[in-house]
């Protein structure tokens, strides 16, 4: 269930990421996406210790940033 939530957000935000990358630039969006994903990954064990719902929220938000950053690299080339 946890992996499903990150995958759903990852898939649905790819279109948004492509649009945002064309507007603000792929480099900035890629850096923000990877940076936020890294911070959220570090917070995952703390969220899991706190509650299941907190873990779920962190993973959903992480999926949003991964989806946005995965499509922004197209603007880099």
Image: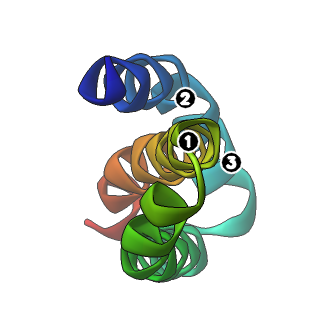
In terms of secondary structure, where does tag 2 sit?
A: loop
In the rendered view, does 31 fall on the left or right side of 23? left
Q: Which of 8/72 is in front?
A: 8
Q: Residue at x 39, y 32 (%)?
A: 6
Most extreme residue toward the right, as rendered? 23
Residue 2 percent across, percent down from the top left:
34, 28
Q: Residue at x 73, y 65 (%)?
A: 24
Establish if 43 lies above or below 49.
Answer: below
Name the residue beneath numbered marker 2. Answer: 13
Q: Earlier in the sequence, mark 2 or mark 1?
A: 2
Image quadrant for the C terminus?
A: bottom left
Name the residue beneath numbered marker 1. Answer: 64
Q: For mark 3, does the 10 Å Cα neighbourhood hold few (<14), some (14 to 19), or many (20 or more) residues?
A: some
In the rendered view, does 20 fall on the left or right side of 68? right
Dividing the picture into quadrants, the one containing residue 15 is: top right
Q: Earlier in the sequence, mark 2 or mark 3?
A: 2
In terms of secondary structure, where does tag 1 sit?
A: helix
Residue 34 percent across, percent down from the top left:
41, 74
Mark 2 touching mark 3, by CB under 8 A?
no
Name the residue beneath numbered marker 3. Answer: 20
Q: Residue at x 34, y 69 (%)?
A: 76
Mark 2 touching mark 1, by CB under 8 A?
yes
In terms of secondary structure, where does tag 3 sit?
A: helix
Residue 8 percent across, percent down from the top left:
42, 16
Q: Which of 73/7 is in front?
A: 7
In the rendered view, does 44 fall on the left or right side of 64? left
């Amino acid at each position: 269930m946890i992996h499903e939530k990150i995958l759903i957000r990852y898939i649905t935000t790819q279109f948004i990421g492509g649009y945002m990358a064309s507007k603000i630039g792929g480099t900035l969006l890629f850096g923000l996406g990877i940076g936020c994903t890294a911070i959220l990954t570090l917070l995952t064990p703390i969220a899991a210790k706190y509650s299941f719902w907190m873990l779920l929220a962190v993973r959903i938000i992480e999926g949003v940033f991964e989806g946005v950053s995965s499509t922004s690299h197209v603007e880099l080339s």
